[in-house]
Image (cartoon, rainbow, N blue to C red):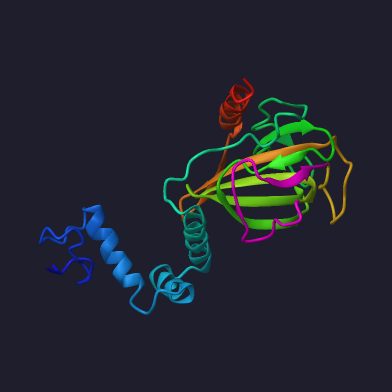
Amino acid sequence: MTIKIFGGMGLDGNKDKVADRTNPEDALFTMAKWLSAEGTNEDAIRRKIWDYYQDGMVVDRISGFARIFREAGTTEIKGNSFPIPKRFNYSYRSTWGDPRGWGGRRMHEGCDIFAGHGTPVLSTAHGVVEVIGWNRFGGWRIGIRDLNNVYHYYAHLAGFEKDVKRGSIVKPGQVIGYVGSSGYGRPGTSGKFPPHLHYGMYRDTGTREWAFDPTPHLRKWEREMKKKRR
């Protein structure tokens, strides 16, 4: 039985003879039917997502999340990783909000983790590589979007893992790059500060994005990493 909600789209997904917009099964069934109306291949689904959101960035993100679930074979995806492997030396403290002067006065939107040049950098979450390449502030950097729509920013790298590129699916603990001292200038600029990983986290609501202090998350992931040593 179809009840005319969702602009006439509402369907009864759980067969209780009511199309209830507050019922997850009904809502999911309705959306699935609407998305597959023009076919079930990826291009057809992307077109329908575009019709709904009219935003190419949203289309890419939803498609990326779908690929994560498809590769995992489940929607129960959990776990995080500290960004430096446990066998390497490193040090850090909260540098969130500290002043920065290069390129104009600004606040530090992240936490600096000092480690030797070439130390592997690990993905902290399941996600999709959204950005990779040079940034005049961050040098060689990678931006990864996780399933909670949090953007993880890894900067001042010496280089990238060879198989990591834009659109790559990554997992916690996977090597994505290497600690360096790149940035603060034109492409290739390096050595203006000691080698370290700048790690940042950004929340996105769809209408605005803002940075938040990643240090509590780093402390938690570090504790979990140390427990695994025992």
- At x 12%, y 68%, the residue is 1
On the image, the x and y values in percent for residue 162 come to: 76, 56
Our reading of the magenta stretch's main secondary structure is loop
Residue 88 appears in the figure? yes
Q: Is residue 176 magenta?
A: yes
Q: Residue furthest top?
A: 230
> Of 17 and 229, which appears nearest the observer?
229
Query: Quick check: 102 left or right of 219?
Result: right
**Above/below status of 159 relative to 112:** below
Residue at image point 27% right, 63% down:
29
Frontmost residue, 26 versus 15? 15
Left or right side of 48 for 56: right
- Numbered marks: total: 0
Q: Quadrant of residue 13?
A: bottom left
**16 and 53: which is toward the camera:** 16
Q: Quadrant of the C terminus?
A: top right
Instruction: Give me the residue at 18% from left, 58% from top.
Output: 14
Q: Is residue 54 left or right of residue 188?
A: left
Residue 106 in sight in this render? no
Q: Residue furthest bottom?
A: 38
Q: Position of residue 18 (x, y in %)?
A: 12, 60
Q: From the viewer's perspective, is 127 left or right of 17? A: right
Q: Give whichever of 139, 103 is nearer the camera.
A: 139
Q: Position of residue 181 (x, y in %)?
A: 83, 42
The residue stretch that appears in magenta:
161-180
Q: Is residue 113 magenta?
A: no
Q: Residue at x 68, y 37 (%)?
A: 108
The correct choice, above or below, for 194 with respect to 75 in the image is: above
